[in-house]
Amino acid sequence: MATTKTTIFCQTSKHPNFQTSNMINIEPSKKLEQLPPYLFTKINLLKNEAYAKNLDVIDLGMGNPDMPTPAHIVDRLCDTVKHHKNTHRYPQAKGMPKFRKAIAEWMARRFGVELDPANEILSLIGSKEGVAHLCMAYLNPNDYVLVCDPAYPVHFNGVVLAGAKIHFMPLLEKNNFLPDFTKIPEKIAQKAKIMFLNYPNNPTAAVVEDNNFWKEAIRFCKKYNILLVSDNAYSELTFGDYSAPSIFEFHGAKDVALEFHSFSKTFNMAGWRLGWVCGDKKLLYPLEKFKSFLDYGAPTFMQLAGVAALNGSQDCVREQSAIYERRMKMMTAGLKKIGWHAPETKATMYVWVGLPECLKKEGSLKAAEDLIKETGVVVSPGVGFGKHGEGYIRISLVTHDKRFHDALLRINKFTKNAKGCK
């Protein structure tokens, strides 16, 4: 992984209101310096510049749901905050029993998976926090972690911040964006401590259609004594007759795996920061212990809103999945017409789009930058998710349906005007 030097600027001598003569000179953690460049920072800067120029921005970059949190969940939160003042106090870090019980019952209904709510479920302040803290709870220097490439960035950034090492497992289109466990070197497998898998996948939107993949992953991790982490944040955003499984549906998973879930995408609660991780209490305990020193857990009123989400009608989830499916079909059909490689997907809120040959030479970051500057359409460069994401962009389906027509018109014009695309 490339090392980049990071400098923290609290003040600057160029700003007239700052005096810098007595400023301390202190270096950040070496772990921060080892993080790869966060390319989305540059994309966000360009997006803000576009807003400042009064460009009509269509933001399809971040996976930030545009649909509101369902009303019954909001109502529960408001009622709890208003009328149950004891929920304003410190929460139970592990998660209140009612919350964990609701999760256990939801997992049983949804996947047929039986969990002990007292010992096998841990609440999280969003699954991203949980993944990063899991790395810190488990990893030592020189430990290896098996991470997909491309991947949701916390899967590799969490490893770097924990001071461990990464072995990337390429996700190639010819392999349906699934890792090939036979390609992992024996020496790496012997040193590996964690493997991250994320299906339905962010960013590629790939799904696992042959359950032998999960069985193979469990066998591999048992053989090499590796903690298998299933990031199942998109399990409910599926289309047609496809249904995403829980890893605990497969024999032996409890011995080797933890599974993360999130309210962010399932219930449009991204800003609420609520999730959970489940699995055997022995595998959960290091994370539970680590978090007990760092945070007090999710607020009680937030957990009770989560109970309302899990116990209430799931029609809202099915309705929003239908919306994402409609948007996906609209975008993939439109992109194909103008020469972009955009296969239909079976899950998530993303379309993983191959750049036309005429744009590949400049790379995905340059394509994303130019697209913002010239058209106001914001997308995520594939290389921001890993080396094997180069040649692709990720489009998030997070704006009103009518705006996708405008986005396609602009992308078409951009493609026609791009050097070498005529």
Image (cartoon, rainbow, N blue to C red):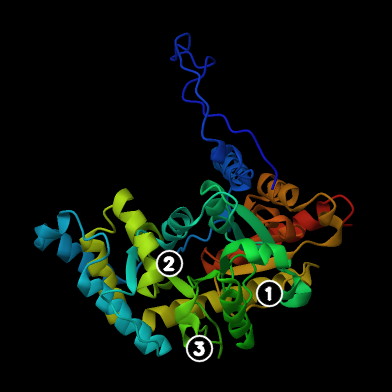
- Is 178 placed left or right of 300 in the picture? right
The spot of residue 181 in percent (x, y) is 69, 74
Q: Secondary structure beneath disc 3?
A: loop
Residue at (61% x, 65% y) in the render: 203
Q: Tell me the quadrant of the picture where the C terminus can be found.
A: bottom right
Residue at (67% x, 40% y) in the render: 3
Disc on res. 67: 2
**The residue under label 3 is which amino acid type?**
His
Front in this rendered view, residue 174 or 43: 174
Q: Residues within 10 Å of mark 3 (few under 14, many from 20)?
A: few
**The residue under label 1 is which amino acid type?**
Leu
Disc on res. 178: 1
Q: Quadrant of residue 360?
A: bottom right
Q: Quadrant of residue 337?
A: bottom right
Looking at marks 3 and 2 on the same chain, the residue that comes earlier in the sequence is marked by 2
Marks 3, 1: nearer the viewer: 3
Front in this rendered view, residue 422 or 199: 199
The spot of residue 101 in percent (x, y) is 25, 78
Q: Is residue 71 above or below residue 243?
A: above
Q: CA distance from mark 2 to mark 1?
A: 30 Å
Q: Is residue 385 visible?
A: no
The mark tally for this picture is: 3
Q: Which residue is mark 3?
A: 251
Q: CA distance from mark 3 to mark 1?
A: 21 Å
Q: CA distance from mark 3 to mark 2?
A: 37 Å
Q: Secondary structure beneath disc 1?
A: loop
- Is 275 placed left or right of 159 in the picture? left
Q: Is residue 354 above or below residue 23?
A: below
Looking at marks 2 and 1 on the same chain, the residue that comes earlier in the sequence is marked by 2
Disc on res. 132: none
The spot of residue 196 in percent (x, y) is 56, 66
